[in-house]
Image: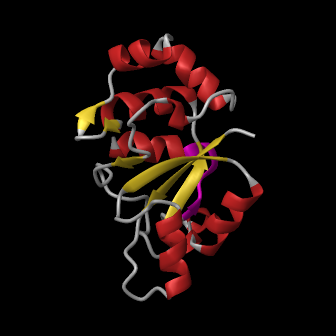
Amino acid sequence: MGLLAIVRIKGTVKANEEVKDTLYLLRLRRNNYAVIMKDTKDIRGMIKKVEPWVAWGEIDKETLKELLLKRGRLEGNKRLTEDYIKQTLNMDIDTFVEKLLNNEIDLDSIPKIKKVFRLKPPSGGYPRKGIKIPYNQGGAYGYYGKDINILLKKMI
């Protein structure tokens, strides 16, 4: 049971209220927002409901570290730094990321952190056929598996 990265890639103009509410519960309020969630049955059910609007998969250690340091924000839109993690948690960033991936610690353990990561659109665009087709058929939405790390690195 690791961590999932979920990235919103589509707007909700023609979506029904149930989809909009689920995206809101996942904290994906705008396009190119990403969240890190524990891989639970409940989260998987929510992802299944909004799958045509999101890209998701398992995040690895390097990508999670890069995401936290480059796109992590605190209240007041201040950057999340290694010094802040060291001051508040008494551990370095590598130890924190390792514990986060092993579900020994939550992202909530960092005081004042925003749990949403605002990303850029991917450099070079979305994969192959665009955002209207699932990833397994050559498009951009749906389950990526470990390939979500490639998409996230293009968006950080």
145 or 92: nearer the viewer: 92
Whether residue 127 is situated above or below residue 145 in the rendered picture: below
Along the horizontal axis of the image, is 68 left or right of 119?
A: right
Indicate whether residue 30 is drawn in magenta. Answer: no
Q: Position of residue 153 (x, y in %)?
A: 40, 39
Query: Magenta segment, which residues?
Result: 142-147
Q: How is the image coloured?
A: secondary structure
Whether residue 141 is situated above or below residue 95 in the rendered picture: below
**Quarter of the figure with the N terminus:** top right
What residue is drawn where x is 52% and y is 65%?
25
Please give the count of numbered marks on the rendered protein: 0
Q: Position of residue 50 (x, y in %)?
A: 57, 72
Indicate whether residue 145 is drawn in magenta. Answer: yes
Q: Position of residue 16 (x, y in %)?
A: 50, 88
Along the horizontal axis of the image, is 20 left or right of 3?
A: left
What residue is drawn where x is 73% and y is 52%?
40
Along the horizontal axis of the image, is 144 left or right of 91?
A: right
Residue 48 quadrant = bottom right
Along the horizontal axis of the image, is 11 left or right of 44?
A: left
What residue is drawn where x is 44% and y is 62%?
28
**Quarter of the figure with the C terminus:** top left
Q: Position of residue 95 (x, y in %)?
A: 56, 15
